[in-house]
Image (cartoon, helix red, strand yellow):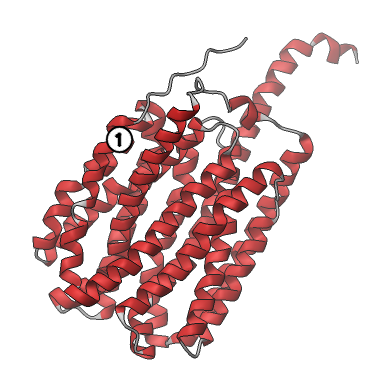
Amino acid sequence: METTLNSTPAAAAEVGAENQQAAEKTGFRVLGAISFSHFLNDMIQSLLLAIYPLLKGNFHLSFVQIGLITLTFQVTASLLQPLIGHYTDKYPQPYSLAIGMGSTLCGLLLLSIAPNFVVLLIAAALVGTGSSVFHPEASRVARMASGGRHGLAQSLFQVGGNAGSAMGPLLAAWIIIPGGQHSIAWFSIAALLAIFVLRQIGHWYQRQQTLGKSKAKRKAASYIALPRDQVIKAVGILLVLIFSKYFYMASLSSYFTFYLISKFQLSVQQAQIHLFVFLAAVAVGTVAGGPIGDRVGRKLVIWVSILGVAPFTLLLPHADLFWTTVLTVIIGLILASAFSAILVFAQELMPGKVGTVSGLFFGFAFGMGGIGAAMLGKLADVYGIFFVYQVCAFLPLIGLLAAFLPKLKPAPVVA
């Protein structure tokens, strides 16, 4: 006992350092787990987009019907996400992540046996519901485990989803296209794995609640609060920027394979590989946006990532196959850096409302993607797929609005 008392200051310092290292290690373990879960979640979701050529052939669908499938999936997610985020801000639900993935699993299995277009829509709605539960709470977990590096945490979380979105078309080309619609059921293994991982994350989340950790609340006032009207204006601008980003992304994620097949006479599998290359570039670009925003400011990242992509989108409709590939890689790298910066900027505008903000922005992004897919599908049916890319090329010019975002000032440190 005497030895312990005499060595208390040094021992306390050593234990404190060990505890800090352990906390950081735990944070990265959780970030890795939630990013991996995001990978599995978005890989499953991207299968729906990747098998559109298969579904179009099997069920004799029009471009409008293809757009309606995307609209059903995206709107189901977008309408529920803000509500779920707002609810879980008040009443955290550690195990809701695993439950939401169960809905995705049901949608996946139904998709593999769907006999008609109506059942396809129901399957898409189930997958969308799972997504609506996953994203707000998973974003909260990422912020909880961030250790104050919110941009880095969101980028790590986002890159898992983008990598999963990139893998979907590749796996569809290898497994589903050769094996047919029923082979979709094999991906239920991924959903079951995600449920297991998310249940473990739920245990960690619940322990944070039980221990009463309030790190997120202590960090909530990192910036001086802005007047309500300025916050509303800034959030409105951010949502318009999300609109421009996801409308353009819808043109590539939903119709890029059709564009390549029509313009360059590629096979379905070749077109899906090109889609994979674009989505892989999106995954890589996502990693950069958050950490760079932590260092140089999120407003600059938002400005560059939206407006900076415009020259390349304007060139894309006029490029040959080689330059189409190059341009889509550049577009994916630049445009992908926007979302993490936009989301964290919005969270800093509205401190203490992580779930509400995450649900609003993920939901709005999904909704814009769905509405964009439906509208662009109608445009493609009437005017042709090439016209879609000529029109969408101008969307990134909306990035000029980033100039009107307020500059956030750090709050004074309270001793």
User: What amino acid is found at the position of numbered circle 1 in the picture?
Assistant: Ala
Q: Is disc 1 surrounded by few (<14), some (14 to 19) or many (20+) residues within 10 Å?
A: many
State how many labels appear: 1
Q: Quadrant of the N terminus?
A: top right
Residue beneath the point at 51% across and 36% down = 347
Residue beneath the point at 14% across and 47% down = 311
Q: Give the residue pinned by disc 1.
A: 402
Q: Is residue 134 left or right of residue 18?
A: left
Image vertical order of residue 210 relative to residue 187, above or below: above
Q: Quadrant of the C terminus?
A: top right
1 or 267, which is in the foreground? 267
Image vertical order of residue 273 relative to residue 368, above or below: below
| Residue 180 locus on image (x, y percent) | 42, 87
Q: Quadrant of residue 102?
A: bottom right
Q: Can residue 273 be seen by looking at this rendering?
A: no
Q: Is residue 351 left or right of residue 48?
A: right
Residue beneath the point at 70% across and 50% down = 94
Residue beneath the point at 69% across and 16% down = 13
Q: Is residue 12 left or right of residue 338?
A: right
Q: Quadrant of residue 356?
A: top right
329 or 301, which is in the foreground? 301
Image vertical order of residue 221 relative to residue 281, above or below: above
Q: Is residue 350 left or right of residue 335?
A: right
| Residue 406 locus on image (x, y percent) | 37, 26
10 or 370, which is in the foreground? 370
| Residue 291 locus on image (x, y percent) | 40, 35
Q: Can residue 362 be seen by looking at this rendering?
A: yes
Label 1, secondary structure: give it.
Answer: helix
Query: Which residue is outermost to the right?
Result: 1
| Residue 55 locus on image (x, y percent) | 38, 83
